[in-house]
Amino acid sequence: MQLGIIGLPLSGKTTVFNALTRGHADVANFASGKLQVHTASVQVPDARVDVLSKMFNPRKTIYAQVQYNDIAGLQRGIGEKGGMDGNLLNQIVQNDAIVHVVRAFQDDNVPHLEGSINPARDLENLDTELILSDLGVVERRIERLKTSLGKGGSTPQEKEAYQKELTQLEHFQKVLEGGGLLRDLELSLAELKPLKSLALTTLKPTLVILNTDEATGDRPLADISYHHKQTQIVALQGKVEMELAQMSDEDAQMFLQEFGIAEPSLPRVIRHSYQLLGLQSFFTVGEDEVRAWTIPVGATAVEAAGAIHTDLAKGFVRAEVVSYDNLIKSGGMTEAKTHGVLRLEGKEYIVHDGDIVHIRSSL
C-alpha cells in the first residue's frame, strides 16, 4: 500500500511524514518550490502479529508494510492552464490513496502564504487545484475521443467503447465544472478500470489530516464541514508526534501520558487508511515464518492464496482456516483442530480480518 502525502506549502506535511515514518527529512520554514519526494516504508503495527510470533517462535516475523511518499508542497495555481506538471501528477496518482495535510497550527516563525490560519479555506483551495487539474485531463481525453469517433477505420466494437467512455467523461466534466470531487460518484470496478490511465486525482480515496498544535488540539475538527465519500478526517499534533517518533518506546510512553495523547499517529493513520481502501489483514504461521498479508475486504481464499504467491492460487486445493480469536482461545493449531475451529474451506470462502490461513496447493 502506497500513501501519498500532499498539502499546500508550509502545511507541515514533511513534519507529519517524519512522525509517521520516524524519518529525518528536512523541515523548512519556507517553501522551496522544488519537486522533492521523500519515501519511507514502515511496518503496520499489529499486536496480533506479536502474539502469534510468541506462540510459534518462528525464524522470521514479517509485518505488513506501508509506503509513505512525501510529495512537494502544491502551490496555488498548479491546476490552472490545463493541469499540473506531468512529473508532479505522476507522483500523486501512483499512490493508492492521498493523505492531505492541512495546516491548523499557529507559528510566527512559519508564515502562512495566505496570511492567516484557516483550515477550511486551505482544504477548499487544494481541492480546487486538483479539480482544475482533473478537468484539464478529462477535457483533453474528450477531444481525442471525439476525433477518434469522427475518423473512419474503427470497428463497431471500438466505436461502442469510445462512445461509452465519452459519455462517462462528459458526465465527469460536468461534475468537475460544478466544483465536485469524482470520488463522490458511485462507480463500479468495471467503470474505474479504464480510468486508471487518466490519472485523475479526485478519484483517489483521501485521508485529511489537520496538523494542529498543543494549544488547539482536536478543536479544528469541529470547525470543518467536509463530507465526501471515500474520505476521512483526523487531527494530530504534527510537531509533537515527530518528536515522539524519535524517542525510545519507554520515553515515548511517558511522553504520551504527559501530553494526553491516546496513541501515536502511525496506528491511527494506518487504521484510517485501511478503512478508506477497504483493506484487512490475514496471517500465515509456522516455524519458519509468521507473516501478515494485506488483502481487500471481501477477498476469497483463492485471492488470498494469490497474495502469497501466484502458484498457490493456480494450484489451489483447499484452505485451512482458523480465526485469530479461536486460535488464541484454543492455545495452538493442534488444539484448534481438536476443538473443531480449524476448518477446510474452498476457493469461494470469504477471508475475514484476522484469519490464519494455510493454503493447500497441487503445485
Image (cartoon, rainbow, N blue to C red):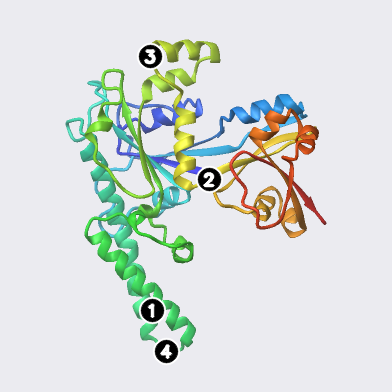
Taking depth in this image into account, of 138 and 216 the one nearest to the observer is 216
Q: CA distance from mark 3 to mark 2?
A: 31 Å
79 up-or-down from 40: above or below: below
The amino acid type of the residue labelled 2 equals Leu
| Residue on which the image places disc 4 | 152
Could you tell me if the residues under marks 1 and 4 are in contact, i.e. CB atoms within 8 Å? no
Which sits earlier in the primary sequence, circle 1 or circle 4?
4
Q: CA distance from mark 3 to mark 4?
A: 69 Å
Q: In the image, which is nearer the foreground, mark 4 or mark 2? A: 2
93 up-or-down from 20: above or below: below
Q: Is residue 129 left or right of residue 16?
A: left
Q: In the image, which is nearer the foreground, mark 3 or mark 4? A: 3
| Local SS, label 4 | loop
Which sits earlier in the primary sequence, circle 3 or circle 1?
1
- Decide if residue 215 is in sight here: yes
Q: CA distance from mark 4 to mark 2?
A: 45 Å
| Residue on which the image places disc 2 | 279
The amino acid type of the residue labelled 4 equals Gly
Residue at 31 percent across and 48 percent down: it is: 228
The amino acid type of the residue labelled 1 equals Gln
| Residue on which the image places disc 1 | 163
Where residue 27 appears, as percent x and y from the top left, is 38, 26
Residue at 39 percent across and 80 percent down: it is: 148
Mark 2, Cα crowd under 10 Å, few <14 / some 14-19 / many 20+, is: some
Where residue 95 appears, as percent x and y from the top left, is 47, 47
Which sits earlier in the primary sequence, circle 3 or circle 2?
3
| Residue on which the image places disc 3 | 259
- Decide if residue 78 is in sight here: no
| Local SS, label 1 | helix
Q: CA distance from mark 1 to mark 4?
A: 14 Å
Q: CA distance from mark 2 to mark 1?
A: 34 Å
Quarter of the image containing the C terminus?
Answer: bottom right
